[in-house]
Amino acid sequence: MLRRLFDLLVATVVLVVCSPLLLLALIAVALESRGSPIYRQRRTGLGGQEFEVIKLRTMVSGAEHLGAGLAVAENDERITRLGALLRRSSIDELPNLINVLRGEMAIIGPRPTVASQVEQYTPRQRGRLSIRPGITGWAQVNGRAGLPWDQRIELDLWYIENRSWKLDRQILRRTLRTVFGGDDLYREDGPAWPSGGEDQ
């Protein structure tokens, strides 16, 4: 209950404070390229339940049907110029706060993934679905997409087994440094995802 109250409080405050920035970003995305400024994708959350994650669009419309599909690498031609900036600053994930208010996500937890990836989980890795997915998490602040897929899952499982308010505070501090530094967005040798699937 305390964690849910924390999520609701943080999501509400950040949305209110950042609403002018979010509005400007929505207008800018719509002006830069054709299509809706909002990107929606089915993801798998708590207990394997699917939901629609909401983000700002950072790629050309229909990008999932072009090039590498769901996989995204640095300097991907499908990423718009504004989209690159939004990704680097993580502004594209601000609409995730709506998912938090709906109860589909938390502020801190494993990033939600697509069903095709969940199908590849081992029984142990399915433990990643035992808590709500988060906007940021232990794997996010320890290499983000620069880590091999299996290692990211192990970091998320470690967080679930050792979750505490002290650890959450550490994650939040690291998240702020990552957001303002814009580091660790991609692997140097390409996407870290197995057989397609990346945050667009």
Image: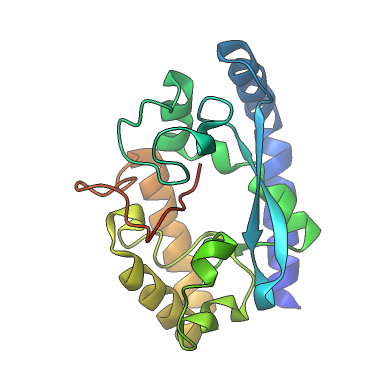
Count of numbered circles on the image? 0
Which residue appears at 60% of the width and 16% of the height? Answer: 28
Q: Is residue 67 found left or right of 12 in the rendered image?
A: left
Q: Nearer the viewer, residue 3 or 26?
A: 26
Where residue 43 appears, x then y in whole percent?
Answer: 63, 58
The residue at the far top in this view is 31
Which residue appears at 28% of the width and 64% of the height? Answer: 148
Q: Is residue 6 found left or right of 28 in the rendered image?
A: right
Where residue 184 appears, x then y in whole percent?
Answer: 30, 48
Q: Nearer the viewer, residue 191 or 116?
A: 116
Where residue 118 appears, x then y in whole percent?
Answer: 53, 70
Image position of 102 with respect to 48: above or below: above
Q: Quadrant of the N terminus?
A: bottom right
The residue at the far left in this view is 189
Image position of 108 with respect to 72: above or below: below
Colour setup of the view: rainbow
Where residue 152 appears, x then y in whole percent?
Answer: 36, 68
Image position of 17 with respect to 120: above or below: above
Which residue appears at 40% of the width and 36% of the height? Answer: 88
Image position of 117 with respect to 46: above or below: above
The residue at the far right in this view is 102
Asked whether the viewer can see residue 110, the reply is no
Asked whether the viewer can see residue 94, the reply is yes
Which residue appears at 60% of the width and 66% of the height? Answer: 133
